[in-house]
Amino acid sequence: MAFPSPSAALRHRFERRTRRLEVAREVRESLVSLAGLQGRPVRLRGGEVIGKVVDVVVHWDTDEPYPPLSGVVAKVGARRAFVAAGAVASVTQREVLLATARLDLRDFAARSGETALAAQVLDHQLVDIDGARVVRAADLYLATFGETVRLVGVDVGLASLLRRLGPARWRTRPTPEAVIDWASVQSFGAGAGQNGARLASHRGELSKLRPAELADLLEDLGRRERQELLDLVEPDTAADALEEMDAAELHQLLAETDTAQAARLIGRMEPDEAADALRDLSEEDRTAILAVLPQQAAAQLRPVLDHPADSAGGAMTTILVLAHPGDTVAEVRRRLAGQAEHVVDLDAIIVVDDEGRLADDISVGELLLAEPGTLLSELMGPPWPVTVTVDADVREIADRLIDSRRLSVVVLDDEDRPLGRILADDVLDAVISGRRRWQIPRAR
């Protein structure tokens, strides 16, 4: 087999790098600043200036990463006229040149599926999906690919904002030192008669974000924007994000959300987290949400709400998997599979006797290692479960967990029947105030 010489391989890498640099330079040099384009002339092919650029309209209801030009809004005398993309020959930083010497202009009217960038995106909040952060559009950049003008980037740099505030001659000089690729942007509330139609969620970008990252975004967004973001993500993902939010921010979000939507979100949260969220609401709002919750979800929440937040009853989750000594490991595994959405709250299964009293607490790890046909009675034995009553203080529970080196405790009623479970991290949540969310960097 013949291998390329080192010099040939080096030349190939150099040529490939050169091509990439040429493409990057071509795109950079062809960037048109939206802020700089405003006020520039709209010129007929014959050279006559018919008006000045007011705004640029793009198609918004598309899954394409870079929205194509729909048309240009121009001020013609006292009118705001619309020039369709088909009549536009080129868009440069100096002017918009039309493809015809004569044009029958029509008044501009917002249409569904289209967005006027200066009016509806510039200076508005956006989400940088790759950076998992909320940004504000200081400028927007257009570029021509083939014969199509497209929105390709958003500038979030201070220099661009200062350029817009400075003399008019500065505005035509793009300063793209902090540009985000538009393909990784989620915007909100931009389309006429539609909800934030620049849907990065259609292409799956929002699914890249972890619940804690979504929680940070929700805390940073304005009221309208965060309601739209909640609508864009899967309901279970939205509920997970709410569980990660700061208590004060979560209270504000739920207070400004209509009762039906708040109930949908609360209903998908883990019972202990949902109870914490409801406690911070007014009694009127709390009662209204409980009234529209599905009966099963409300039944799981009410026992937790009946107890103070710093007690075992107030910190427990009521999601339990119960079994009997005569059940097989295979039967219990199937039961656990039906509770997959609550996996974070299930570190063990509770074995009860015929009267429903606690007999043992068997870890999920033991179940995974045991043979499918093994009876639970064969797995029962020391170390016995750590138990507390509903009135136990969370600090006491923390001491019990430390002494026993267990991951959870079982909450019992006065007759030793299990009511709930408290995981170690829930105890920490209750004991430590102002906790910080630690995030693992996402793979790029």
Image (cartoon, helix red, strand yellow):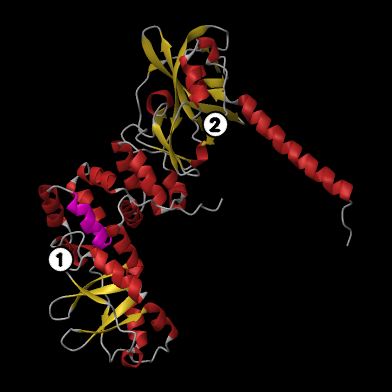
Magenta region includes residue 382:
no
Q: Which residues are magenta?
A: 267-280
Could you tell me which residue is drawn at 27 percent across and 90 percent down? Answer: 325
Percent across and percent down for residue 202 are 43, 47
- Chief secondary structure of the magenta portion: helix
Q: Which quadrant of the structure image shows residue 400? A: bottom left
| Spot occupied by residue 267 in the image (x, y as percentages of width and height) | 23, 58
Decide: marks 2, 1 in contact (CB < 8 A)? no
Secondary structure under badge 1?
A: helix
Q: Was residue 274 drawn as part of the magenta stretch in this picture?
A: yes
Residue 65 shows in this picture: no
In the figure, is residue 1 to the left or right of 181? right
Q: Amino acid at mark 1?
A: Pro
- Name the residue: 49% across, 30% down: 156
Image spot of residue 384 (x, y percent): 30, 84
User: Which quadrant holds residue 397?
Assistant: bottom left
Instruction: Say above or below: 163 vs 409.
Output: above
Q: Earlier in the sequence, mark 2 or mark 1?
A: 2
Task: Locate the N terminus and report the quarter of the image it occupies.
Answer: bottom right
The residue under label 1 is 303
Task: Left or right? Give the position of 45 relative to 164.
Answer: right
Provide residue 65's location: percent of width, then percent of height.
51, 40
> Crowding at label 2, few (<14), some or many (≥20) Cα neighbours within 10 Å?
some
Q: State the residue in front, 356 or 60.
A: 356
Q: Which residue is mark 2?
A: 178
Above or below 19: residue 169 = above
Label 2: state its secondary structure. Answer: loop
Image check: 416 left or right of 71?
A: left
